[in-house]
Image (spheres, rainbow, N blue to C red):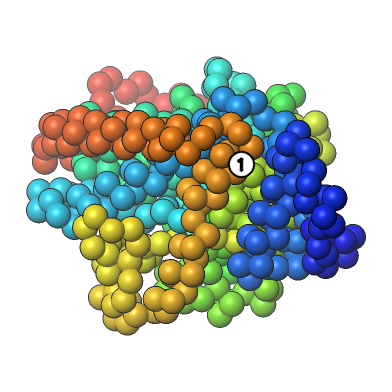
Amino acid sequence: MTDNDGNLVFCSDEEEQAPQSESRRGFLKLAALSGAVATLSTRRALANGDTAFHAKDLPDDKLIDMYRTILKIRWHERTQADQMLGNPDYRGYNHFYAGQEAVATGVCAALRNDGPFEQIDLVYSTHRPSGHAIAKGVDIPTMVAEMDFRATGMNGGYAAEMHISDPSVGFVGADGMIGPGHVTATGSAFAFRARGSDQVSVVFGGDGTYATPQFHSALNNAKLLDLPFIYVLENNLYHQYAHYTYSCPHRDIADAATAYGIPARVVDGQDVMQVYNAAKEAVDRARAGGGPGFIEAKTYRYYNHWGAPGAKEGELGAFGYDPLAITSFRPEREVRAWMQRDPVDIARNILVDWGVVDEARATEIEDEVKTEITAAFEWGLAQPLCTPEDGLKHVFAEGTVLPRQFG
C-alpha cells in the first residue's frame, strides 16, 4: 500500500487475511502498486490513492462488459494485422491500438453511450482510432468494411481508418491531423453548456500533441469557460519514432494541465480499473458543472507507429527493424517488458480475483469475442469495393441548389 505521501508500505498479516468481501479493494491496491512501478510515473500513480474506489462497486455485468470491450479491441487489432501481413488482396491499414485497450475501455465505460444524440456524451479521436471507436460502441463489421474501402462501410468507404465516424453512438470521429480535435471537442463542450445540457465532451490525444498550439489553446479555453471537457492523453512514450521527452519538458505531461488550473490525474494505462476511476471522477465533476479534467494514462503500443512492419502473422506485437523508421527505434526488451503487464491479463486477473468469473468462464468469453471478430471480418471483407466513379460523390452539392439570399 502507500502512505499519504505516496510511499510504499507493506500490509500486515491481518490485512493480508482480510475477508473476501474486502478483496476487490485490496486486490486493486496491490495492482496499482505493481502497475505504477512498471510505468514512468511511479510516484504520481502511487499517489492517486485507492484504485478500486469506484470500480469495486460496479455490477458484475458491467465489469464483464469492460473485459469484453478490451478483448474486442485486441482481437480486432490482431486480426487486422494478420490480414495486412497475410492477405495480398487486403487494402486496409491501421495505426494499431493494441496495448492501449484499457485506456479507451476505462474512459468510455464512464460515459453515457446510449440514447438520443442530444443526450449522449461525445468522443473525439485521433489517427489511432479503432480502440476508441470500439469502446464507444460502433458497429464492428461496418468498421471492418470501412477500413478496407468497402462501399457499405460505416462511412461509405470514404473515411478508411483515420476519419471513421459514427455520431449515433457519440463517436464524432477520428482525425488524421495532430491537435485539431481538441479545439472542436471544446466547441462541443461549449455548446453543451450554452444549451444547459449535462453532456460531456472527451478528446483523446497522444503524447505528441503537447507540442501543438491546439493542445494549449483547448486547455486554456476549457478552464477559462469551465467547460464540461475532458482531455485523455495516452502517453505511449513515442510520437511516431521519437521518445516523447524530446519535445516535452515534463516527465508527466499532466503537469501542463495543472498549470492551467485543471485537475489532472496520472494513471497506469494498462489497468482498466485505474483508468475507469479517474474517468468517473472527471466525468462526474464535469457533468455537475465543475469544469474540465485531464487524465494522462501511461501506456504502450505493441506495434510500430503505423501498419505492421516488424510483426509476424499469428503473433502479437512488432519487434526489430521498421523500414518506415529506417531503424529499430524501440528496444525489443522494452516492448516485451510492457507486454508483461498486458491490459487483457490485468483485467482478466481482476475479474477472477473478485469472483466475477472463473478462469474457465474468462476463457469462454475470449473465445466468444474471437468468434465475433472473425465473423465481422468475414462480413466486412465480403462487401462490395468502392468504385472509381464514386470518387467525386459528396464533394460537390447534388440536385437543385437555391441561389444564396442576401439582405
Q: Residue at x 55, y 46 (%)?
A: 349
**Quadrant including the C terminus:** top right
Measuring 44% from the left and 76% from the top, which residue is drawn there?
333
For residue 128, above or below residue 72: below
Residue drawn at the location 62% of the way across and 67% of the way down: 39
Q: Nearer the viewer, residue 363 or 286?
A: 363
Secondary structure type for disc 1: helix
The residue labelled by disc 1 is 353
* Residue at (46% x, 24% y) in the render: 168
Task: Decide: few, some or many residues near mark 1? Use Cα within 10 Å; few <14, some 14-19, many ≥20.
Answer: some
Left or right of 127: which side holds 83? left
Image coordinates for residue 116, horizontal then vertical, percent: 55, 17
Say which of 188 and 206 sits in front.
Answer: 206
Q: Quadrant of residue 378?
A: top left
Quadrant location, the N terminus: bottom right
**Can residue 106 be seen by looking at this rendering?**
no
Q: Amino acid at mark 1?
A: Asp
Q: Position of residue 327 (x, y in %)?
A: 32, 82
| Residue 245 higher or lower than 93, as above or below | below
Location of residue 365 in the rendering, given as x and y in whole percent from the top left corner: 41, 33
With 81 as the anchor, is 207 left or right in this view? right
Which residue occupies the extreme right position in the image? 4
Residue 285 percent location from the top left of the image: 79, 37
Q: Is residue 118 visible?
A: yes
